[in-house]
Amino acid sequence: MEHFHMLRVSRHHAVHCKQNSLPTMESAINVLVSQFKTYAGKDSSAHTLTKEEFQSLVVSQLPNLVKNATDPAVIDQLMGSLDENNDGELTFQEFWQLIGTLASRHAGYSK
Ligand SMILES: [Ca+2]
Ligand SMILES: [Ca+2]
């Protein structure tokens, strides 16, 4: 009887989890968006990354894919290559290019 009860609970739990979980790729997108918002929101311009916010994101979230991100020269160079309108801040669209580049390189698809 006790065993049966446990089984029911775990099956209920599994169904419950499935209803609330997103497909893997959608949850990866959720993570990217929410991390961008978290780092972008550290100052008053909540939807763009300053150089400091960008560095903090890269150093803590992408340490294996972006080497030497603690080096200001590396961040300057990276920021410059992403900041298309040269306003010193990265929108999500500007930042997204980095994810595309890193993902392609990670997959072995980059030039
Ligand atoms: Ca910001
Ligand atoms: Ca910009």
Image (cartoon, helix red, strand yellow):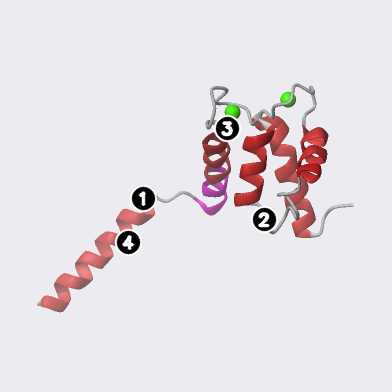
Instruction: Report the span colored magenta.
Output: 23-29
Give the residue type that dot 3 points to. Answer: Ala
Which mark, residue 62? Answer: none
Quarter of the view holding residue 95: top right
Q: Is mark 2 on a helix, strand or loop?
A: loop
Give the residue type that dot 2 points to. Answer: Pro
Q: Which percent across, then down, holds residue 100?
A: 74, 44
Q: Is mark 3 on a helix, strand or loop?
A: helix
Residue topped by disc 4: 14
Of tags 3 and 1, which is closer to the observer? Answer: 3
**Label 3 lies in ligand 1 vicinity (Cβ under 8 Å):** yes
Up/down of 22 relative to 84, above or below: below
Report the residue at 54% width, 27% height from top. 43
Residue topped by disc 1: 19
Residue topped by disc 2: 63
Q: What element carries label 4?
A: helix
Quarter of the view holding residue 93: top right
Report the residue at 79% width, 23% height from top. 86
Counting residues from the start of the chain, the first of labels 2 and 3 encountered is: 3
Q: Which percent across, then down, holds residue 59?
A: 65, 50
Q: In which quarter of the image is ligand 1?
A: top right
The Cα atoms of the two marked residues, 2 and 3, are separated by 18 Å
The Cα atoms of the two marked residues, 3 and 1, are separated by 30 Å
Which mark, residue 40? Answer: 3
The Cα atoms of the two marked residues, 2 and 1, are separated by 33 Å
